[in-house]
Amino acid sequence: MATSQSGGITAYSVKTKTKNVPMIDPVIDVKSGRYIATGKDSAGNKMAAIMSKATAEGHISSGNAKKGSGW
């Protein structure tokens, strides 16, 4: 689950097994009615986080993320 920490999107990194890793340049897509933020961490590992519509729109309106496909 994605959380907002200091304005940015954070997620769990499966590769490094750490929580609340900040996502760099996230893009939020809508797939099958789910809002999915995809991006990379500081080491270049791919990350993804599923969030609610309200959370996704909040991140886009504040400039923390870009709109992807499916909107």
Image (cartoon, rainbow, N blue to C red):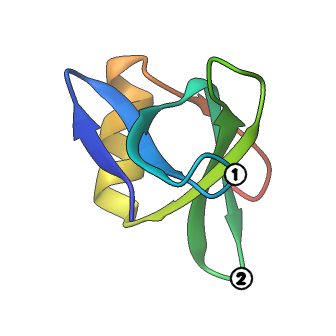
Left or right? Give the position of 43 relative to 42: right
Q: Nearer the viewer, residue 58 or 2?
A: 2
Of the 4 image quadrants, the one containing the N terminus is: bottom left
Of the 4 image quadrants, the one containing the C terminus is: bottom right
Q: Residue at x 38, y 55 (%)?
A: 2
Q: Is residue 11 above or below residue 61?
A: below
The answer to which quarter of the image holds residue 32 is bottom right
Q: Is residue 57 above or below residue 49?
A: above
Q: Residue at x 43, y 22 (%)?
A: 64
| Disc on res. 34 | none
- Residue 67 is at least partly visible in this image: no
Residue type at tag 2: Ser
In the displayed orientation, state which residue is furthest to the bottom.
32
| Disc on res. 15 | 1
Badge nearest the viewer, 1 or 2:
1
Q: Residue at x 67, y 46 (%)?
A: 47
Q: Is residue 62 above or below residue 53?
A: above
Residue wearing tag 2: 32
Residue 22 in picture, x, y percent from top left:
44, 28
Q: Residue at x 30, y 39 (%)?
A: 58
Question: Tag 1's secondary structure?
Answer: loop
Left or right? Give the position of 47 relative to 62: right
Mark 1, residues whose alpha carbon is within 10 Å: few (<14), some, or many (≥20)?
few
Residue 4 in picture, x, y percent from top left:
25, 39
The answer to which quarter of the image holds residue 7 is top left
Could you give the CA–CA distance between mark 1 and mark 2, rounded to whole angstroms? 26 Å
Mark 2, residues whose alpha carbon is within 10 Å: few (<14), some, or many (≥20)?
few
